[in-house]
Amino acid sequence: MTRLRSAGWSGTGDRLISGKLRAIEGVGHAVCLPRAGKAASPLEAIGTTEERVLRVRQVHGTRLVEWSEPAETIPEGDGVLVRRPGAWAGIRTADCVPLLLVGEGALAVVHAGWRGTLAGIAALAVGALGGEARAMTAVLGPHIGACCYEVAEELGGRFRERFGASVVRPNGHLGLGAAIRSDLERAGVMADRIFEGAPCTYCDPRAFPSWRREGEGAGRLLTLVGFE
């Protein structure tokens, strides 16, 4: 776990915790790792229940859903907003970026793959949270890093045009985190309140699922955030 701690993350068995978010009073979170044969569900492990968590049917879009009451059906979207005490939100990823945002009396968790990132889902989430963007905290969870994420030249060109040349390395590797940081800063989030440094999901097959490495059968990380 040394590498995780050096980047502000620590491991607790089948969960990862961000030191930056843990320091915010009243906000709970966890990145739950897929493990076979677990005795307890991830929700039980963090002290909540299925009824208190809103999850969405993710479609690589930009729709953000606000938690109101337990839904009879799972809504379609790629981000969840929370404003109520005791309410939690969750998204699943396997290489895409789980983005956690903490605003004034509001939280969000966002699924940001390359499509959503290009479409500006990070900035849309900042706007949807409301309040002072400069006071928000943003944490990017484990995702495929620029070390491993090679993309086609056409896609790389679209990212360069949208976010600047630095988000794509000369070898054609894309930095999703760098692109999201750029979008957040344009939306008004302060650079020193945006925290990257999470592990790369592709690099460590023993710890993380990766769609690019394993294909459709890859497991999923479950990223949760809520008011305790």
Image (cartoon, helix red, strand yellow):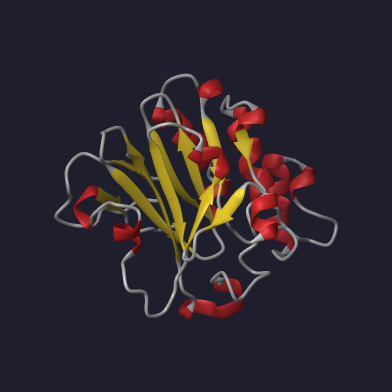
Residue appearing at x 45%, y 71% in the figure: 34
Question: Which residue is more in the foreground, 224 or 154?
Answer: 224
Position in image of residue 67 (x %, y %): 26, 41
Q: Is residue 39 above or below residue 184?
A: below
Position in image of residue 1 (x %, y %): 64, 61
| Residue placed furthest toward the top | 132
Position in image of residue 223 (x %, y %): 43, 54
Q: Quadrant of the C terminus?
A: top left
Residue appearing at x 69%, y 45% in the figure: 178
Residue 213 visible from this viewpoint: yes
Position in image of residue 168 (x %, y %): 76, 52
Q: Quadrant of residue 192?
A: top right
| Residue placed furthest toward the left | 72
Q: Is residue 183 above or below residue 115?
A: above
Q: Is residue 218 above or below residue 122?
A: below
Classify residue 155 as left or right of residue 86: right
Classify residue 20 as left or right of residue 148: left
Q: How many marks?
A: 0
Classify residue 151 as left or right of residue 83: right
Classify residue 69 as left or right of residue 194: left
| Residue placed furthest toward the right | 170
Question: Which residue is more in the foreground, 143 or 156?
Answer: 143
Residue appearing at x 59%, y 58% in the figure: 143
Q: Is residue 38 above or below residue 78?
A: below
Residue 61 visible from this viewpoint: no
